[in-house]
Image (cartoon, rainbow, N blue to C red):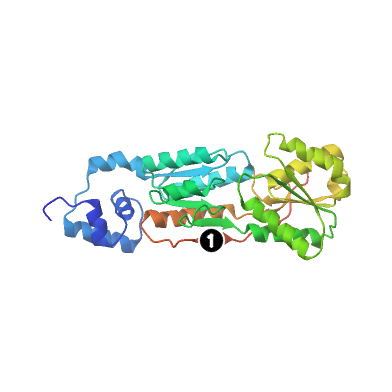
């Protein structure tokens, strides 16, 4: 070889991805088998890393962007906490981006991530498919909760199973006058899957129920209050597709008539906490948030290391029903 060997040459001879070679050179952990292959290829080619380029790129190559639609709720706050913890454990820096559920903002975040050559992106997207089709070839991408493209691996809780579990729990408690509480969405999301599964399960059993979908307007809390003030006395069970909506309902009922809190069983969905020491104030279908994060990071690191992840990869994690740890709030 007349020219100086490059990182691409090392990757080709070692039979690994360029990202694996980069991780090796920058001192990050890779599989022992790959480490030996890269080490052998470097010696065989006489490759000498460009230390100046390494210094310039280290900060970029060790950054992973985490996109959330909001950081306003306990669920997303807990997700962010565990994501930073897990990425740090693997010597990566988390760059947090809030898309505000806007496809335009998310596309701009992805464009900047590609431009800055970050190591990868993990997204909790409420955005359009085309955003990811445009960028999936240039970015290592993983999605949590919502499938955004066949090329992007999906890690999700069992939203359908959770909706069914909520219905079963309410029936087990002998609740007969049920309400499905949700909110309009920009796109088909995990909350829609929960609602659909809950509805289908009850329909299959011939059980009628009421449904209220609050709007996307900032007034949605007041909308829920107004609905429950009108219909609350006729209910004995509510499934709220998120804990946020469940807590809004619980506070509304406490204001309308505290006796309604004894009459109506409320089941939420998420099971996140405001802090590590705070109790759960709501019966809920609990998502395995820490496991979701670990699996998403695991798959992303495989992609960064140049390992093949098959198209339409999906990992669905089970959910569980948990009782509130404190009634008052």
In this picture, is 8 found above or below 250?
below
Whether residue 168 is visible to the viewer of this picture, yes or no, is no
Q: Position of residue 170 (x, y in %)?
A: 79, 58
Whether residue 67 is visible to the viewer of this picture, yes or no, is yes
Characterize the local packing of mark 1: few (<14), some (14-19) or many (20 or more) Cα atoms within 10 angstroms.
Answer: some
In this picture, is 302 found above or below 243?
below
Q: Position of residue 141 (x, y in %)?
A: 45, 51
Q: Position of residue 91 (x, y in %)?
A: 40, 47
Q: Position of residue 313 (x, y in %)?
A: 49, 61
Which residue of the protein is positioned furthest toward the front in this rendering?
130
Q: Is residue 99 left or right of residue 74?
A: left
Q: In the depicted view, which residue is nearer to us: 77 or 222?
A: 222
Which residue of the protein is positioned furthest toward the left in this rendering?
2
In this picture, is 37 found above or below 232?
below
Examine the image and state in which quarter residue 73 appears: top right
Query: Quadrant where the C terminus lies?
Result: top right
Say which residue appears at 83% left-offset and 37% top-offset.
Answer: 255
In this picture, is 233 found above or below 177?
above
Q: In this view, does 187 lie to the left or right of 109?
A: right
Examine the image and state in which quarter residue 157 appears: bottom right
Numbered-mark total = 1
Q: Name the residue under label 1.
A: 315
Say which residue appears at 36% left-offset and 41% top-offset.
Answer: 60
SS for dot 1: strand
Query: Quadrant where the N terminus lies?
Result: bottom left
């Amino acid at each position: 070889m007349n020219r100086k060997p490059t990182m691409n040459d090392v990757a080709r001879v070692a039979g690994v991805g360029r990202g694996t070679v980069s991780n090796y050179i920058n001192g990050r952990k890779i599989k022992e088998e790959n480490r030996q292959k890269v080490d052998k290829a470097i010696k065989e080619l006489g490759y000498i890393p460009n230390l100046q380029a390494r210094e310039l790129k280290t900060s970029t190559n060790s950054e992973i962007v985490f996109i959330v639609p909001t950081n306003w709720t306990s669920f997303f706050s807990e997700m962010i906490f565990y994501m930073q913890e897990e990425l740090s454990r693997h010597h990566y820096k988390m760059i947090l981006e809030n898309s505000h559920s806007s496809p335009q903002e998310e596309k701009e975040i992805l464009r900047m991530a590609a431009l800055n050559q970050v190591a990868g992106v993990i997204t909790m997207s409420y955005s359009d498919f085309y955003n990811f089709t445009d960028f999936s070839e240039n970015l290592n991408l993983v999605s949590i909760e919502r499938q955004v493209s066949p090329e992007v691996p999906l890690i999700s809780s069992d939203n359908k199973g959770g909706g069914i579990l909520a219905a079963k729990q309410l029936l087990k408690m002998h609740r007969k006058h049920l309400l499905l509480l949700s909110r309009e969405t920009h796109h088909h999301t995990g909350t829609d899957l929960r609602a659909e599964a809950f509805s289908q399960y009850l329909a299959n059993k011939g059980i009628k129920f009421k449904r209220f979908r609050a709007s996307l307007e900032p007034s949605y809390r007041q909308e829920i209050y107004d609905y429950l003030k009108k219909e609350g006395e006729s209910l004995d069970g509510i499934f709220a597709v998120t804990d946020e909506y469940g807590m809004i309902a619980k506070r509304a009922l406490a204001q309308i008539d505290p006796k309604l809190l004894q009459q109506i069983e409320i089941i939420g969905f998420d099971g996140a906490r405001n802090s590590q020491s705070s109790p759960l104030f709501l019966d809920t279908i609990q998502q395995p948030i820490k496991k979701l994060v670990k699996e998403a990071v695991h798959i992303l690191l495989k992609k960064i290391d140049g390992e093949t992840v098959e198209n339409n990869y999906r990992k669905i994690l089970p959910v569980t029903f948990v009782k509130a740890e404190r009634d008052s709030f």
